[in-house]
Image (cartoon, rainbow, N blue to C red):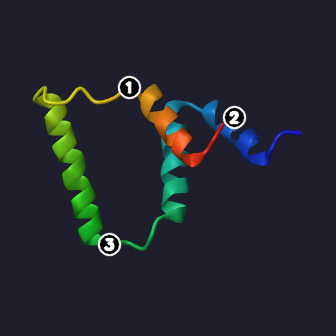
Amino acid sequence: MAHPTEDILAAALSLPEGERLRLASELLASVEEPHDDSWNAAWIGELERREQAVRDGRSAGDAWAEVRARVLARLGAP
């Protein structure tokens, strides 16, 4: 028997990209801590720093498949 989470994930992955992004945003918002302007500013600053590093050629970033595998390994997911 499949787990409900797996069923939901399979259904979500079949959605168009825009809908998947909307769903991901809603899920993240449902578990995030209360709004903290200083944390948000720090996070946006870090994202901008990383973006600039890529634009300047100082960083190539990592392939999504590699990042996803690392995250799943940390979470102990199969």
**Residue at x 22%, y 61% (from the top left corner):** 42
Pointer 1 residue: 63
Residue 75, percent across and down?
A: 57, 47
Residue 2 lies left or right of residue 67; in this view the side is right
Q: Quadrant of the N terminus?
A: top right
Mark 3 belongs to which amino acid? Asp
Q: Is residue 17 above or below residue 29?
A: above
Mark 1 belongs to which amino acid? Ala
Upstream in sequence: badge 1 or badge 2: 2
Pointer 2 residue: 10
Farthest residue in the right direction? 1
- For the residues labelled 3 and 1, the Cα–Cα distance comes to 30 Å
User: Image quarter for residue 44?
Assistant: bottom left
**Residue at x 42%, y 74% (from the top left corner):** 34
Pointer 3 residue: 36
- For the residues labelled 3 and 2, the Cα–Cα distance comes to 33 Å
- For the residues labelled 1 and 2, the Cα–Cα distance comes to 22 Å
Q: How many marks?
A: 3
Seen from the viewer's position, the closer of residues 22 and 62 is: 62
Q: Is residue 30 above or below residue 6?
A: below
Q: Is residue 60 above or below residue 71?
A: above
